[in-house]
């Protein structure tokens, strides 16, 4: 028997009474909110839910699909390197639910009960980057706004969607991956571009956000090296 979480679950009215959902899909939705409340996201497998509710894998997949298609959850699949095999799956509560219902969602906390204030649903690494003004916003919206601030300053605005996907994956990878780190890296990169503007062409945004922000840069002064012009 699967261990039953003791974290608080939320099932808004628009989920409870949605006739487009299979009868027990709202219960699965509540379970997902409980796990998101604990970790900031749900990474439980189909097998976990199968054992918890004593149903088949196809039933769990049907429930998840219905919740996804009706806009109640967002699913993200991470594939193994150079493979189509799934490595990890993340499920998050869609912020659309809470905009429709007009209710807040609780952040990860040692106290699973909702607080009498508006909090955001996020994991540790995004929580540490939030300001007081963003405390009421869902994690996905916070990530989007943080990315937009960086993107606004980035000089070569090609591949924005891919850049955002790279940014999200990097942020979620470790609590050490913060916006402050990228802000410093971007400041260094902008300085490098300015020092070498006569010959250096900034790389596409999708390329820089895909780990190239860690490139070693010579910030000691301009280099007269026209043969090193960098096109992406």
Image: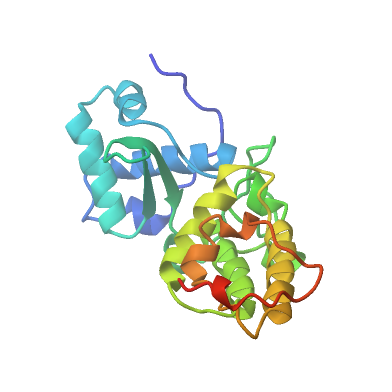
Q: For the point 74% across and 67% down, which residue is it? A: 188
Q: Nearer the viewer, residue 115 or 76?
A: 76
Residue 23 visible in rendering: no
Q: For the point 68% across and 68% down, which residue is it? A: 186
Q: Nearer the viewer, residue 149 or 35?
A: 149
* Image: 11 above or below 119: above
* Colour setup of the view: rainbow
* Image: 179 above or below 192: above
Which quadrant is home to the N terminus? top left
Q: Would residue 106 appear left or right of 32 to someone viewing this image?
A: right
Residue 31 visible in rendering: yes
Q: Residue furthest bottom?
A: 198
Choose top left, top right, bottom left or bottom right for residue 100: bottom left
Q: For the point 56% across and 54% down, which residue is it? A: 105
Where residue 122 appears, as percent x and y from the top left, is 59, 51
Q: For the point 54% across and 67% down, which residue is it? A: 144
Which quadrant is home to the C terminus? bottom left
Choose top left, top right, bottom left or bottom right for residue 184: bottom right
Where residue 103 appears, as percent x and y from the top left, is 54, 61
Q: Residue furthest top?
A: 1
Task: Say how many tags the image has.
Answer: 0
Where residue 106 appears, as percent x and y from the top left, is 61, 50
Q: Would residue 163 appear left or right of 74 to someone viewing this image?
A: right
Where residue 84 appears, as percent x and y from the top left, is 26, 41
């Amino acid at each position: 028997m699967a261990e039953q979480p003791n974290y608080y679950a939320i099932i808004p009215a628009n989920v409870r009474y949605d006739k487009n959902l299979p009868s027990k899909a709202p219960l699965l939705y509540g379970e997902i909110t409980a796990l998101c409340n604990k970790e900031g996201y749900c990474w439980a497998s189909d097998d976990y839910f199968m054992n918890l509710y004593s149903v088949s894998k196809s039933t769990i997949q049907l429930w998840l699909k219905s919740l996804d298609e009706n806009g109640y959850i967002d699913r993200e699949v991470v594939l193994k390197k150079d493979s189509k095999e799934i490595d990890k799956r993340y499920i998050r509560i869609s912020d659309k639910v809470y905009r429709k219902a007009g209710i807040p969602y609780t952040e990860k906390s040692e106290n699973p009960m909702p607080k009498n204030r508006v909090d955001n649903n996020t994991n540790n690494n995004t929580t540490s980057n939030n300001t007081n003004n963003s405390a009421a916003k869902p994690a996905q919206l916070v990530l989007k706004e943080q990315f937009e601030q960086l993107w606004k300053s980035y000089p070569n605005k090609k591949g924005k969607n891919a850049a955002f996907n790279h940014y999200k994956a990097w942020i979620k990878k470790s609590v050490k991956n913060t916006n402050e780190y990228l802000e410093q890296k971007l400041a260094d990169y902008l300085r490098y571009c300015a020092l070498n503007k006569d010959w250096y062409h900034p790389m596409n945004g999708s390329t820089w956000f895909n780990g190239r922000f860690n490139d070693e840069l010579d910030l000691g002064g301009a280099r007269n090296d026209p043969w090193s012009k960098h096109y992406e």
